[in-house]
Amino acid sequence: MPWFRHRLTLPAYRRGFHIITRQVVEAVPELAQIQIGTLHIFIQHTSASLSINENADPDVPVDMESAFNAIAPEDFPYQHTCEGPDDMPAHVKASLLGNSLTIPVERGRLLLGTWQGIYLCEHRNHGGSRSLVLTLHGE
């Protein structure tokens, strides 16, 4: 069973939840060869995260951002404040959502549900570009 690894550098996104499904699929051309397998996606950052969520209604990412801002507000009395007021809340949000996803692959396609998309969750006001490691395994 072959293994393929790619790195995907995403451009800087504004703070919020951004669908990146297309960019991920385009970064792994060997996906078309896989009849059954998995794609593992890992983000190499501590202030951004990954999630799978609804990809159709534009209100979903707006509501997700609002909900996470309520869960980890900037005005909480954090100890770690040297990188600005959005940094520690970003770490909390990233810990809650996680730094990786594993998605099944079948007949050259990600087995995402009809309404599912892969999200980059940018938790910083000016997070910069983000690096993903994409590991495909299958036959």
Image (cartoon, rainbow, N blue to C red):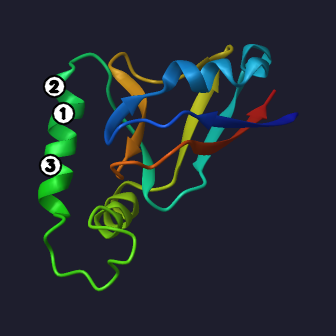
Q: Residue at x 21, y 20 (%)?
A: 58
Q: Position of residue 28 (x, y in %)?
A: 72, 24
Q: CA distance from mark 1 to mark 3?
A: 9 Å
Specify the amino acid type for callout 2: Asp
Residue placed under numbered mark 1 in the picture: 62
Q: What residue occupies the far bottom of the structure in this picture?
A: 79
Q: What residue is disc 3 on?
A: 67
Q: CA distance from mark 2 to mark 3?
A: 12 Å
- How many residues crowd mark 1 within 10 Å: few (<14), some (14–19), many (20+)? few
- Look at 60% across and 48% down and name the residue there: 42
The amino acid marked with disc number 3 is: Ala
User: Any mark on residue 59, and which?
Assistant: 2
Rendered image quadrant of residue 45: bottom right
The image shows residue 26 at horizontal and vertical percentages of 65, 18
Q: Position of residue 37 (x, y in %)?
A: 70, 31
On screen, 77 above or below 37? below
**103 sits to left or right of 92:** right
Q: Secondary structure at mark 3?
A: helix
The residue lying toward the viewer, choosing from 12 and 62, is 12
Quarter of the image that includes the N terminus? top right
Question: What type is the residue that disc 1 sits on?
Answer: Val
Tell me which residue sits at (37%, 54%) in the image.
Answer: 97
Q: Mark 2–mark 1 contact, CB under 8 Å?
A: yes
For residue 51, the mark is none
Q: Secondary structure at mark 2?
A: helix
- Specify the quadrant of the image occupied by residue 90: bottom left
Q: Residue at x 50, y 24 (%)?
A: 21
Q: Is residue 11 above or below residue 89?
A: above
